[in-house]
Structures are given as C-alpha cells and as structure tokens.
Amino acid sequence: MDGEAMPGLLLEQKHGGRVAGVDEVGRGPLAGPVVAAAVVFGAGVPHDLAAIIDDSKKLKPALREAIAARLPKVAGVEIGVGAASCNEIDRLNIYHAAHLAMLRAVARLPRVPDHVLVDGNKMPDFGCSAQAVVGGDGISLSIAAASIVAKVLRDRIMTRLDARWPHYGWARNAGYGTDAHQQGLERAGISPHHRKTFGSVRLRMSMILTEEQV
C-alpha cells in the first residue's frame, strides 16, 4: 500500500443501485479449481476497513484472512462465490471456465445486481448491466474485496487438497508450477486435481499415452 492510490467506490457510486464487484483467482496454476467471488457493498464500507482493502496480490495472507472474516459482518454486504473444477477447465479451457465461475458467483448473490464491475477486459453475459475494468482490483473496493474473498477461499481449498495429496506442496504454492510441485509430479505422477491441458501436466499426460502405445 505504501502511499499508492487505494481502491474506492467511485465506479459503484457513478452507476448507483446495487453494484457487484467480481474477480477470479487461479487462472495460472497447474492444479485445482478457478474460484470467483462477487461482493456488493449495499450500505458503504467502514472507513477503517476501506483503508486496508486492496488487490489481494498486494496483501499478506494474514491480512487477507482478517478482511475476509470481517466482510460478512459489514452491514448491507452481499457475497457470492463460485468455482469451476479442473475437469471443467480442461473441457471448456481456462478462459471460459473462469467466466463460468464468475457467473456462478453472481448467481449466488441474494438478488441479481443492478450492475456488475469485473476485473479485466473481458466478461461473460451476466444478464444485467456490466462493465469490464482493467486493473479493477486496484480501482474498485467491490472488486478488490471480491479478489480477497476468492483468494482466501481458493487457498483454503488447496490447503485441504494438500492434506490428501501431499506430494505437490499445494498448501504453499496453491497449485502453481513451482519447483516443489514439478518434483512432486515427477515422483507421484498426476493427481485427479491436476489440469490435464496445462503445461507440464499436459506434457506428462502425452508421455504416459505414448508409453501405453509402445
């Protein structure tokens, strides 16, 4: 944060009504779901909370956890979360799977919002007014809050999966292709939670198929 401009509610106030900020986490990993969240601040944001909400990538894990725990207690807040599985990612591709997760997150809000703000330059059809905002998680408090909720939820999912599939270091790398993860693939092979169309996982799948055909 260190003196940088912080997200605010200008975009939300410009449109008016119930505005949902939407963001997703987990496009790049080799394993696990892509997770999205939608957040509506129906009655504003307490000043002390607004002062610490930022793009989830800029925040330390403990602060993300603290913010995520407090958000449901804010008056007027609405939160929806959605995900797309690794099987859906392989079937649809990550672009469409991420959009599916976003649609599911918005669908899980109590009501259809009047407007949706999405981080990025592309978005699915939410069935309501919507706007893609490049760098939105550094501009909009709703989007930044959604990025935090999605990140915390996905990290928890990967930590739980790590307990069952401990070879890959998912509790530490969240499924990204770190050295430890690559070494786990070498030792233990591909798990049911790997994305079979991604990078080194796809390469290993092709090697397995080739060996089976020999």
Image (cartoon, rainbow, N blue to C red):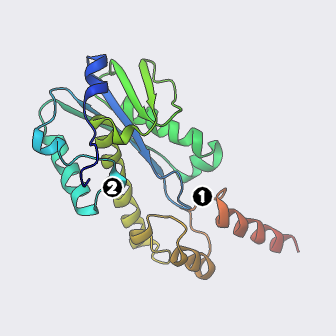
Q: Secondary structure at mark 2?
A: helix
Please provide percent x and percent y for residue 76: 15, 29
Q: Amino acid at mark 2?
A: Lys
To which residue does mark 2 refer?
A: 58
Residue 153 visible in image: no
Q: Amino acid at mark 1?
A: Arg
Q: Residue furthest front?
A: 3
Q: Which mark is residue 59?
A: none
Please name whichever residue, 11 or 36, is drawn nearer the observer in this view of the structure. Answer: 11
What is the total number of numbered labels drawn onto the structure image?
2
Please provide percent x and percent y for residue 56: 33, 51
Q: Which mark is residue 195?
A: 1
Q: Which quadrant of the rendered structure holds the C terminus?
A: bottom right
Q: Residue furthest right?
A: 214
Residue 67's place in the image compared with 157, above or below, is above
Looking at the rendered image, the disc whose residue lies closer to the viewer, 2 or 1, is 2
Residue appearing at x 60%, y 75% in the figure = 185
N-terminal label among 2 and 1 = 2
Residue appearing at x 64%, y 45% in the figure = 91
Please name whichever residue, 185 or 15, is drawn nearer the observer in this view of the structure. Answer: 15
Residue 6's place in the image compared with 197, above or below, is above
Please provide percent x and percent y for residue 121: 52, 33
Corner quadrant of residue 10: top left
Residue 89 visible in image: yes
Residue appearing at x 51%, y 42% in the figure = 98
Residue appearing at x 63%, y 50% in the figure = 90
Please provide percent x and percent y for residue 105: 38, 36
Corner quadrant of residue 184: bottom right
- Residue 36 is left or right of residue 113, and the answer is right
